[in-house]
């Protein structure tokens, strides 16, 4: 019997081929690709579950990572983070998403699966930081528009405006997340990105319920 993950990988590969041929419009491609990618991460987690253990809640976020070594006009690499909650633990899948390359959820795209037992969770803290990568990418874009504006004409002005907006967005609108503090578990702290999303709020509520049901106090920041 074929591995379910291999079937999903094949679906993702076919989606990329159809998009490259022009058989699939961008909007439909992104929607279907996101769905099958989440299915792939879910299948990866389900392979590691114990008998009787099932996924209760999940939360998915994609972060863009712009590198200064890449052209400012190129699509940035992305890091997908998916959190899956069971009644025993919180599992995390992290994977690189590279433009034009099918997601595989294995060593080929640097996928990492780790976890933290609910019994080890102590509290959830609210964190924030400015976005230096976004600000630097915006500065680089604006600099290109300024230096080559004489030759780029309208495009140069557009690059400067977009670059300025990128700098302002990176400095004035910091990234916010919730960080789970606990004993043991993963080496890197668990972060709940995009805490305002419905799935993130439901995840925190469910974690609090299961931790409190074990007779432990559980600190959650106001608004989480």
Image: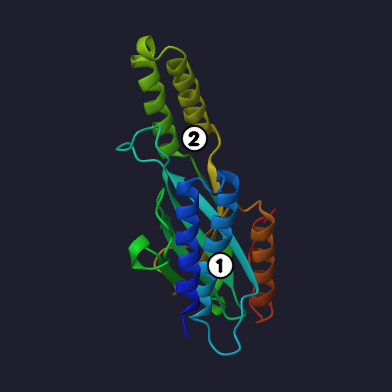
The residue where tag 1 is placed is: 39
Tell me what residue is drawn at x 45 percent, y 73 percent: 6
Ranked by sequence position, the earlier of labels 2 and 1 is 1
| Element at label 1 | helix
Coloration of the structure image: rainbow
- Along the line of sight, the residue nearer the viewer: 85 or 221: 85
The residue where tag 2 is placed is: 170
Tell me what residue is drawn at x 41 percent, y 42 percent: 76
Decide: is 196 above or below 93.
Answer: above
Q: Residue furthest top?
A: 150
Quadrant of the image occupied by residue 224: bottom right
Residue 130: image location, x then y, percent: 48, 39
Q: Give the class, few, some or many, for how many residues have Cα within 10 Å of label 1's Cα (few <14, many ≥20).
A: some
| Residue 190 in sight from this viewpoint | no
Residue 122: image location, x then y, percent: 56, 70
Q: What distance separates the C-alpha of mark 2 from that of mark 1?
A: 32 Å
- Asked if residue 156 lies left or right of residue 28, the reply is left
| Element at label 2 | helix
Tell me what residue is drawn at x 46 percent, y 79 percent: 3
Residue 32: image location, x then y, percent: 58, 56
* Circle count: 2
Decide: is 93 above or below 4.
Answer: above
| Foreground tag (2 vs 1) | 1
Q: Give the class, few, some or many, for how many residues have Cα within 10 Å of label 2's Cα (few <14, many ≥20).
A: many
Q: Residue furthest bottom?
A: 51
């Amino acid at each position: 019997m074929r591995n379910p993950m291999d079937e999903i990988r094949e679906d993702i590969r076919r989606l990329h081929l159809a998009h490259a041929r022009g058989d699939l419009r961008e909007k439909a491609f992104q929607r279907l690709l996101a769905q099958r990618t989440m299915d792939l991460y879910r299948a990866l987690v389900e392979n590691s579950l114990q008998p009787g253990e099932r996924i209760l809640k999940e939360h998915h976020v994609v972060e863009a990572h712009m590198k200064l070594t890449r052209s400012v006009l190129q699509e940035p690499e992305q890091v997908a983070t998916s959190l899956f909650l069971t009644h025993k633990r919180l599992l995390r899948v992290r994977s690189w998403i590279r433009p034009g390359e099918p997601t595989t959820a294995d060593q080929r795209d640097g996928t990492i699966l780790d976890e933290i037992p609910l019994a080890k969770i102590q509290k959830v803290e609210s964190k924030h930081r400015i976005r230096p990568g976004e600000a630097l990418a915006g500065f680089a874009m604006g600099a290109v528009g300024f230096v080559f504006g004489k030759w780029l004409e309208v495009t140069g002005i557009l690059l400067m405006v977009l670059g300025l907006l990128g700098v302002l967005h990176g400095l004035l609108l910091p990234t916010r997340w919730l960080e789970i503090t606990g004993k043991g578990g993963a080496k890197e702290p668990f972060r709940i990105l995009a805490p305002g999303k419905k799935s993130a709020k439901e995840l925190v509520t469910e974690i609090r319920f299961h931790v409190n049901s074990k007779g432990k106090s559980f600190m959650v920041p106001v608004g989480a």
